Image: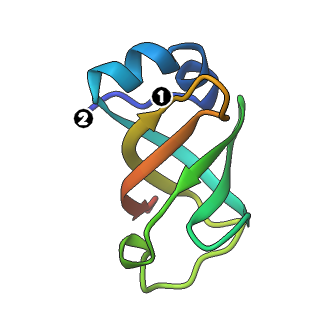
Amino acid sequence: TAKFYTVKEIKDKATRLDRSDELVKVKGYIIKQINKDTYEFKDNTGTILVDIDKKKLPTRLFDDKTELILIGEVDYDLLEPVEIEVEEVLFVN
């Protein structure tokens, strides 16, 4: 996927993105871990929950100051917050 989305765009278009199973790409920072696989991700437009399987986390250490690119599918359920199911985590070089 070539286009970068912002957190705001993903939240605004969550229904369509969830239905289309389109991969989205976001650039920003993982600012905290919520539970085993759920993290809070932030860019300059807001924050969103991201679900990252332990096997998909990079082996290289990173913190809330490390800029990352996340690629994944949008997961939207009516009564739940919008989430990104992350397929790949890349470092911004």
* Badge 2 element: loop
Left or right of 31? Residue 13 is: left
Q: Quadrant of the N terminus?
A: top left
Which residue is the extreme one toward the front? Answer: 79
Of 64 and 84, which appears nearest the observer? 84
Q: Is residue 17 above or below residue 54?
A: above
Mark 2: give few (<14), some (14-19) or many (20+) Cα within 10 Å.
few
Q: Marks 2/1: CA distance?
A: 10 Å
Which x, y percent locates residue 20?
A: 28, 21
Examine the rendered structure and indicate whether residue 14 appears above or below residue 86.
above
Outermost residue to the left: 1
Q: Which residue is mark 2?
A: 1
What amino acid does circle 1 point to?
Tyr
Q: Nearer the viewer, residue 29 or 82?
A: 82
At a point 27% along the width and 32% down the height, the residue shown is 2
Q: Which residue is mark 1?
A: 5
